[in-house]
Image (cartoon, rainbow, N blue to C red):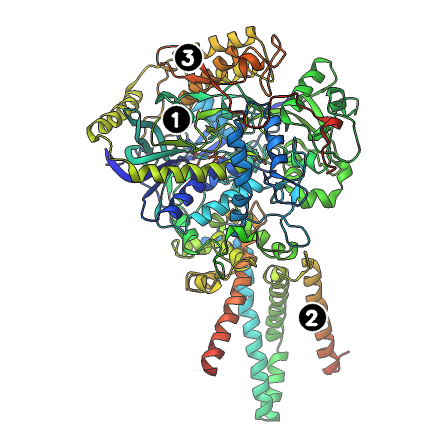
């Protein structure tokens, strides 16, 4: 097996991975960086982010406001030291992006413009029309080309982490065009592999978001934290699951039920003012809006039709000019996919799985319990999002914690001695052996698509917007069954060149592991908090559950779940207040 | 929802068994609102697991799913079945070597992208503490269109010059990106990019067929960018001549 | 050793433009320029003859009145129109005019070119005493 030596190995070249790579290159140009990604960097799913990235920049705003919005938005499951660090750092990162060429939308004065976003009291979301993530990703990618120490390994599929007695030693990855397994030896490894929304059937997440990195860490003994918190975004296009950004509502769009009534006023989010008010109505947090949809649907007040159960997103009053300027992609997508032009028509929408609040457990420096192993971006759980992420905080998160994890990885790489070679080589050989065995397996009766469908379905039914013991037990059982049958999947494609049957099979394996962590963590959390709503335990229970759940991998059965206290510094848990009482700024 | 049977003719190339690409036809029961990519996914899931192609976002922004569909370079996720008959032909993009089935080798493009120095080259380093650059909406507008490229490579597939020069020509997207940075008010890197842009393989290789701009799914108009770059490049050349004469 | 074997499709250097309607119309534009050039050559030749003296000039005049030359001229004129329209159509791409946050509408730029062409042609016709 070919060995590739690097000081720092980064798995994933999305926003977090690229930011980390640049941070390493700037911290110490003499360090070799191996940037490993299963897709070309610009295909990473950061490109799909539309709305924007929050950072305090205007005179009427303060770091405390951003802190409070984030902590209460996360229903106090956020680690407050991490949030404080985050709100302090993010604006610098956004300015840095500006210096690197990110085409932020501007005010007429030439300063960056900000827009309102859900759950934020003041307008503070920087945006580049409705293609913010796209522009950020391309800016980062293009900027990364400046640094000779960043060596890219595009279309390399990472499979396993190498760990020597709780010290990270690198990873294995398959070069997709040759099918050859390579061993990347690195003094530090940073996982930036993105989310796992694809475990659900109806999601805004692209095909690549299969939780590979989460599963790699999980199998290597790192706990997955707060996996039961899955964000549903309230406005996805029915059928395809394509996202219509929160910017639609930030700019003043309404959500209407079948009676053309702004139903959110019935869920403690009112009053319904014609102009948007922050933290009210359509600008409430995502968990509350998605839950309101579910309630409306139970009351029979959603629209039934060719799209199933939907509500209307009404942007007609915004006018063609504003829609073209600020929401051009939204218009394009709506016309193409549901034949509704937001300028003249109501657009059908429904909640859609969007984001994993949980992920690889790290501390405030992006460090996992395995020395030299770091994680950043959506795959990580530093705990700034708690039980519900506020829109426009995760593009910020990947910058702040991508760069921060990188700096700590650099320190680590400089201090550490080389891991034991023989042991690492043996682990790599094991990893290769597993792939070879998969190729050799014949007569497998299980099909990837079928297992994926069953897993998808059970998560939607059992671990959706509302859950209860019965639904969760059902999910746990189905996932265990799928996991067992997965061992009987055989490849139909035995080619070594760009074998997507192989990669989809490996991705399914990772998804099953993530799904298992989601279902078990949700089953054990007998309270309702943020995005985790239990019909059988409707109250938040701070006594028992002001804690992060930690799912530990068990190769032979159910994961073990234990808990870690939440870090509280200055904001004591209180009721989450939205609507008139929240005192949000008029947008 | 109504179903429709589509004959999907896909160009297959499996390096371990095919000497050259061959068409394979799949009968796919499609939903009315599907795109071609959905039909391919159906084949992959239900009919033939050996079919290889790239995709991810399904919302025309990641640039993975460029194919030649009925002879036109298109994004698979933006090619709606309602716009096609019951027989659809899907091939890999032209002008790139075929790695496998619909997957093409794009190393050459990635190298070219790097060659045009697609990043801000500032007049002087500015610290983050000094805040953002002031850039008016009008200054933003000047280059914005050229920053919309998703690197889908439909334009390279459509560009005869790229094919005729055996990939020597730097090509539409990379040149448009160079132009994007040249036009950015924060950048002074035009002279650093000039030797690539004005080289024989640069803007002057373009004969303005204009196909790139027609097929571009993001209205980047690379052909326009290249013609404008020719103009500035010529002016630069002339002024440098005059400059030499004057000194 | 890897089983990679990327397949390179060859592009015909001589008939590539037959593979797509778009390329054919591009070729038409390119070919039309040959006719434009030839006709220019004819006109310049006329100028030389005029300079040479009345005899040469008369010969040239009768040459261009020859039915065959007239037919060829008409063909050239047709190509001239093709060349002009296809060129004008492409002008807004090469020439972007920005005023503040907007670009001048391409149709205006194209329209401007036709107006200029009209005025210029009228001027020439007046000079020639036709109009
Ligand atoms: C439609 C949409 C809109 C959004 N809008 C917003 C918004 O407006 N504001 C906001 O703040 N957030 C938004 N988000 C969330 C945000 O975009 C994501 O959380 C964030 O971009 C994740 O970035 P990342 O770098 O962690 O991961 P990604 O960009 O997903 O990158 C993951 C990387 O990991 C690599 N990888 C994965 N597995 C492997 C493997 N096995 N081997 C090798 N490489 C691997 C991939 O190739 C890829 O390069 C949005 C999300 C979606 C889906
Ligand atoms: S210029 Fe257009 S066609 Fe070419 S790669 Fe970019 S987006 Fe695709
Ligand atoms: S799948 Fe991303 S552009 Fe088509």
Residue A19: percent from left, percent from top: 45, 42
Q: Read off the residue under disc 3.
A: A560
Front residue of A357/A142: it is A357
- Give the x, y percent position of residue B162: 43, 54
Q: CA distance from mark 1 to mark 2?
A: 61 Å
Position of A497 with respect to B68 (left or right) is left
Look at the picture and state if A193 lies above or below A524.
Answer: below
Near mark 2 (Cα within 10 A), the count class, few <14, some 14-19 or many ≥20, is few
Instruction: Report whether mark 3 lies on the same chain as mark 1.
Output: yes
Disc 1 and disc 2 on one polypeptide chain: no
Which is more foreground, mark 1 or mark 2?
Answer: 1
Of tags 3 and 2, which is closer to the observer? 3
Q: Which residue was labeled with disc 1?
A: A501
Secondary structure beneath label 3? strand
Q: Would you say residue C4 is visible in this rendering?
A: no
Q: CA distance from mark 3 to mark 1?
A: 31 Å
Q: Nearer the viewer, residue A63 or A489?
A: A63
Q: Position of residue B92 (x, y in %)?
A: 44, 40
Mark 1 neighbour class, 10 Å CA radius: few under 14, some 14 to 19, many 20 or more: many
**Position of C85 relative to A270 (above/below):** below
Task: Give the SS element for disc 2.
Answer: helix
| Marks 3 and 2, how far apart at CA | 81 Å
Q: Chain of mark 2?
A: C
Instruction: Name the residue beneath numbered marker 2.
Output: C117
Residue A388 occupies quadrant:
top right
């Amino acid at each position: 097996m070919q060995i590739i030596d690097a000081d720092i190995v980064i798995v994933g070249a999305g926003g977090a991975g690229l930011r980390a790579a640049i941070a390493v290159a700037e911290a110490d140009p003499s360090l070799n960086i191996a940037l490993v990604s299963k897709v070309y960097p610009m295909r990473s799913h950061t490109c799909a982010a539309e709305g924007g990235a929050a950072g305090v920049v205007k005179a009427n705003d303060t770091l405390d406001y951003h802190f409070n919005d984030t902590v209460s938005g996360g229903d106090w499951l956020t680690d407050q030291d991490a949030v404080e660090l985050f709100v302090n750092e993010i604006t610098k990162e956004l300015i840095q992006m500006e210096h690197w060429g990110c085409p932020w939308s501007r005010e007429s004065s030439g300063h960056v413009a900000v827009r309102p976003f859900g759950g934020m009291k003041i307008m503070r979301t920087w945006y580049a029309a409705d293609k913010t993530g796209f522009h950020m990703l391309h800016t980062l990618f293009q900027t990364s080309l400046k640094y000779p120490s960043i060596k890219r390994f595009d279309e390399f599929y990472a499979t396993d982490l190498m760990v020597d007695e709780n010290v990270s030693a690198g990873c294995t990855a398959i070069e997709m065009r040759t099918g050859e397994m390579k061993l990347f030896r690195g003094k530090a490894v940073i996982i930036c592999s993105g989310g796992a929304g694809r475990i659900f059937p109806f999601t805004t997440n692209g095909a690549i978001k299969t939780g590979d990195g989460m599963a790699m860490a999980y199998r290597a003994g790192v706990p997955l934290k707060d996996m039961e918190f899955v964000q549903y975004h309230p406005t996805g296009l029915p059928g395809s699951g394509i996202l219509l950004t929160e910017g639609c509502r930030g700019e003043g769009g309404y959500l209407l039920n079948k009676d053309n009534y702004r139903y959110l006023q019935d869920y403690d989010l009112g009053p319904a003012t014609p102009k948007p008010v922050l933290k009210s109505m359509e600008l409430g947090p995502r968990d509350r809006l998605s839950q309101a949809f579910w309630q409306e649907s139970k009351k029979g007040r959603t629209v039934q039709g060719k799209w199933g159960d939907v509500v209307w997103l009404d942007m007609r009053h915004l006018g063609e000019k504003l829609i073209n300027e600020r929401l051009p992609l939204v218009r394009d997508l709506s016309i193409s996919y549901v034949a509704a032009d937001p300028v003249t028509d109501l657009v059908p929408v429904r909640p859609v799985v969007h984001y994993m609040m949980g992920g690889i457990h790290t501390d405030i420096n992006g460090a996992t319990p395995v020395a030299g192993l770091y994680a950043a971006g959506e795959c990580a759980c530093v705990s700034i999002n708690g039980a519900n992420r506020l829109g426009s905080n995760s593009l910020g998160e990947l910058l702040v914690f991508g760069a921060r994890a990188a700096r700590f990885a650099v320190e680590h790489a400089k201090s550490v001695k080389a891991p034991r070679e023989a042991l690492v080589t043996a682990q790599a050989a094991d990893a290769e052996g597993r792939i070879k065995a998969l190729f050799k397996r014949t007569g497998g009766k299980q099909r990837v698509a079928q297992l994926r469908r069953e897993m998808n379905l059970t998560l939607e039914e059992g671990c959706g917007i509302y859950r209860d013991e019965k639904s969760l037990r059902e999910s746990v059982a189905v996932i265990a069954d799928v996991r067992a049958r997965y061992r009987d999947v055989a490849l139909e494609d035995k080619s070594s060149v760009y074998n997507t049957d192989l990669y989809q099979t490996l991705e399914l394996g990772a998804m099953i592991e993530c799904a298992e962590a989601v279902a078990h963590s949700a089953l054990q959390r007998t309270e309702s908090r943020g995005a985790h709503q239990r019909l059988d335990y409707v109250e938040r229970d701070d006594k028992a559950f002001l804690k992060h759940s930690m799912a530990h991998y068990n190769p032979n059965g159910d994961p073990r779940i234990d808990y870690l206290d939440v870090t509280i510094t200055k904001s004591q848990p209180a009721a989450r207040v939205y609507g008139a009482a929240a005192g949000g700024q008029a947008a | 929802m109504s179903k429709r049977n589509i004959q999907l003719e896909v160009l297959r190339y499996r390096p371990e068994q095919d000497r050259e690409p061959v068409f394979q036809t799949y009968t796919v029961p499609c939903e009315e609102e599907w795109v071609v990519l959905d039909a391919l996914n159906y084949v992959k899931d239900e009919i033939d697991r050996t079919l290889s192609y790239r995709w991810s976002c399904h919302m025309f922004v990641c640039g993975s799913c460029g194919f030649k569909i009925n002879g036109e370079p298109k994004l698979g996720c933006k090619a709606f079945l309602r716009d096609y008959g019951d027989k659809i032909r899907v091939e890999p993009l032209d002008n790139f070597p075929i790695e496998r089935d619909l997957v093409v080798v794009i190393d050459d493009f990635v190298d070219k992208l790097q060659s045009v120095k697609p990043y801000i080259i500032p007049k002087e380093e500015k610290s983050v503490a000094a805040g953002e650059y002031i850039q008016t909406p009008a200054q933003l507008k000047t280059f914005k269109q050229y920053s919309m490229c998703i690197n889908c490579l439909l334009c390279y597939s459509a560009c005869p010059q790229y094919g005729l020069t055996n990939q020597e020509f730097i090509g539409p997207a990379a040149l448009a990106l160079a132009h994007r940075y040249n036009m950015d008010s924060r950048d002074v890197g035009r002279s650093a990019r000039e030797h690539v842009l004005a080289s024989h393989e640069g803007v002057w290789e373009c004969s303005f067929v204009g196909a790139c701009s027609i097929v571009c799914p993001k209205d980047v108009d690379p052909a326009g960018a290249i013609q404008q770059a020719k103009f500035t490049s010529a002016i630069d050349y002339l002024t440098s001549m005059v400059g030499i004469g004057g000194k | 050793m890897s089983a990679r074997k990327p397949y390179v499709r060859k592009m015909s250097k001589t008939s590539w433009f037959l593979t797509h309607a778009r390329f054919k119309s591009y070729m038409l534009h390119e070919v039309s320029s040959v006719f434009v050039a030839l006709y220019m050559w004819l006109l310049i030749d006329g100028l030389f003859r005029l300079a040479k003296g009345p005899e040469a000039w008369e010969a040239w005049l009768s040459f261009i009145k020859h039915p065959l030359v007239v037919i060829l001229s008409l063909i050239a004129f047709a190509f001239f129109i093709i060349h002009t329209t296809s060129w004008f159509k492409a002008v807004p791409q090469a020439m972007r005019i920005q005023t503040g946050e907007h670009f001048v509408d391409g149709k205006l730029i194209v329209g401007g070119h036709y107006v200029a062409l009209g005025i210029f042609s009228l001027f020439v016709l007046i000079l020639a005493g036709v109009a």
